[in-house]
Each structure stands twice: as structure tokens, then as C-alpha cells.
Amino acid sequence: MQAYLEITIPIEKDELVEKCKLGDRDSYKILYQKYAKAMFNTSLRMLNNRKDAEDILQDSFIAAFETLESFQYKSTFGAWMKKIVINKSINHLRKKKIDLIEIEKASMVELPQEEKLDENELTLKVETIKKAMMSLPNGYRTVLSLYLFEGYDHEEIAEILNVAHTTVRTQYMRAKQKLLMIIKNGG
């Protein structure tokens, strides 16, 4: 049996978070201003709807502030907040009945060989990719956003979405292929 060593680096307490825990209203405002833009962008990439992303942002901060006492510095406040935003965004998609298709239920459709794209030929700017991602179906966009922008691996995404990791891998490959086709065809 192989033993694994877990290296843990203690995360320093955030003075701003600690002031919030003590009820300092100005600190709540500063903390919100510090993280709001990044959290909004995370939600927007997943939901593709400004109003929904704004609602999720507000709900996420309310939830975070209401449960701030439970924040134990096992991660940074930003990472903890991002997890709340991602979970609320996914729950929002689920409420709208936008689900990933289980691989076992999906009919496998392969693209003809001539439609396969050479990724190395495409040199893309970030804005072009973001714009193209907005035209993807929600399931594809969610998986791509979690993988490319949020840095989660396939297994973590499967756990977050509560689906099989093979479903995530398939959704990712199809999403990437569709994204490349959208970009190649000019958006």
C-alpha cells in the first residue's frame, strides 16, 4: 500500500473577513466590491444571461455573508466564494431543466472526417472564444467554463454536476469540437 503525504499550507486569516465576522458593515461592502466582478463573470460564463448572473451574484453573497461564521480558512475566501457561485449557477441551470445528457442515453453521432478541425491552425483571442462560447448550448458551456476558466478537472466537474465522469468527458469533447466549428465559421 502506497502512502500519500498531504502537504497543507496554512491559509492566513483575512483581516477583512474577520472584520465582517465581527459585524463591521463597511468591511462587508469592501469584501463585496473586491470579489463581485470576478464572481459575476464566473456566473455569466456558465449562465449566458446577465440578469440571471446578477441574481446569482446577489444570492451568493447573501448566502456567504449569512454563513460567514462557518468559513474556516480551509481555502481562501475567494475560492470559497467561487464554489458558492458555481453551485448556485448550476442549481439555477437545473431549475431551468437544462441538464447534461447521460452518455448511455445519448446517441453517438460522429462528425465526418472532413469536418474535424486542426486546433493548431486556429490562433484565437480570448474575446473571440468567449463570444463563441455564448452560442453553445448550456450543458456544453457549463462543462467548458468549469474546465477552461475555473480550472476544475473532469472528475471534479462530474462531482459538481452529479453525473458520470464519462458524461463530462464526452460533453467536454463535443463542446470543444462545436466551439471550434463556431469559431472556424466566423461566430
Image (cartoon, rainbow, N blue to C red):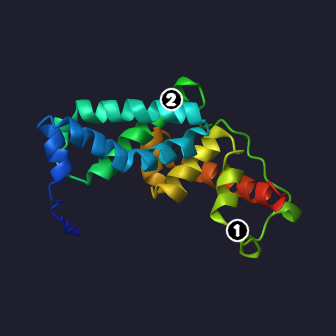
Inter-mark Cα distance, 1 to 2: 30 Å
Which picture quadrant has residue 31? Answer: top left
Q: Position of residue 116 (x, y in %)?
A: 80, 64
Q: Which residue is mark 2?
A: 92
Q: Secondary structure at mark 2?
A: helix
The residue at the point 72 percent across, 70 percent down is 119
Q: Nearer the viewer, residue 103 or 1?
A: 103
Q: Amino acid at mark 1?
A: Leu
Q: Nearer the viewer, residue 22 or 66?
A: 22
Q: Quadrant of the N terminus?
A: bottom left
Looking at marks 1 and 2 on the same chain, the residue that comes earlier in the sequence is marked by 2
Q: Residue furthest front?
A: 26
With respect to residue 101, does 9 lie above or below? below
Is residue 108 visible in this depiction of the protein? yes
Q: Position of residue 30 (x, y in %)?
A: 29, 45
The residue at the point 88 percent across, 64 percent down is 114
Q: Nearer the viewer, mark 1 or mark 2?
A: 1
Is residue 103 visible in this depiction of the protein? no
Q: Which residue is mark 1?
A: 124
Q: Amino acid at mark 2?
A: His
